[in-house]
Each structure stands twice: as structure tokens, then as C-alpha cells.
Amino acid sequence: YLSRDIMLDPFFHELAQEVDRQTRQNKTAVLVGMHLCGKLSERAIELFERIPSIQALVLCPCCLPKSQKKSTSPTAFDSYWMQNGGEAYITWCSYLEEKIQNVVVDPDERFLLDVRSYRDSDIHSSRNSVITVTRK
């Protein structure tokens, strides 16, 4: 179990080393993000993308990132939301799913990503989307 500030770059290196250590022991690395607020969902996707030995990602996004729509430089999500519209949380989840589908994988490895999403009625919150990704 690691308890770290995942937004800091040293965390990436520490996580990559831990994942490498675990996979050398024939363990499967799965990154799980439950109720990730704001930019933490995007960071989990980035970590999944940057550490190819992580075989799966389970993402349950929560709060949206702070909007910059009124500023001169809206966030990527703000632009997506303005273009696609819709209920904020549903649009946030669609944005994250699309972001995952655009994950760049090593062409030499020929990884395929299996991306699925659903609403889990057993989660007692209106923010009950689950996005799963596996490398094939």
C-alpha cells in the first residue's frame, strides 16, 4: 500500500518501480481509482498510459475539475463540454472514456485496449460510473 501525492512527478517514478518489482514476481498490476475528484481521474489515466506494465485500470470518477470556461484558456474538458454539452457528470465520464481510448500505446507491443463503462446502481451516489480498461 502506498500513500503518496500522486500529482507530483516523483510519485510516477516510485509507482513505476513498484509496478516493475511486482510484475517481476509474476503479479498483475491493476491501477484502481475510486471516487477520484477533479484532475485525479486524468492523472490515473496518465499513469496507466506511462506505465505499460499496468495491465488494467478501474476508474470511478467523482467531482469534475474546476471549470475555466470563463477564462481565456479553458481546460481540455471545458472545451469538450462546450462542444458536446449534456449533464456535467455524464459528459465528464464520456470525456475520460474518450481520453482513455486515445491512450498512446507502444506500436512495437501491439497492445489493444478494451475500454468499457457502465453505471453501477449498487454505488449509492448519482456519481456511479465505472470505467474499466484492460490491455490485451
Image: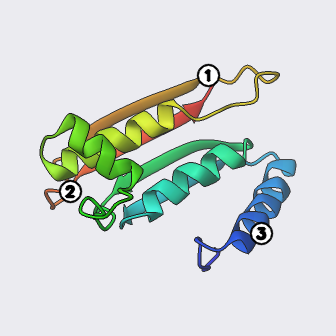
Are the residues at dot 3 and dot 1 in contact (C-beta closer than 8 Å)? no
Task: Classify residue 71 by image quadrant.
Answer: bottom left
The mark that comes first in sequence, 1 or 2, is 1
Instruction: Name the residue type under label 1.
Output: Leu
Q: CA distance from mark 1 to mark 2?
A: 28 Å
Residue furthest toward the front? 72
Q: Foreground residue, 70 or 50? A: 70
Q: Is residue 132 above or below residue 5?
A: above
Horizontal side of 21 relative to 81 (left or right) equals: right
Residue at 53 percent across and 59 percent down: it is: 43
Residue denoted by label 2: 127
Q: Position of residue 25 (x, y in %)?
A: 84, 51
Residue denoted by label 1: 112
Horizontal side of 107 relative to 116 (left or right) equals: right
Q: Which mark is residue 14?
A: 3
Instruction: Name the residue type under label 2.
Output: Arg
Quadrant of the image containing the N terminus: bottom right
Residue at 46 percent across and 64 percent down: it is: 40
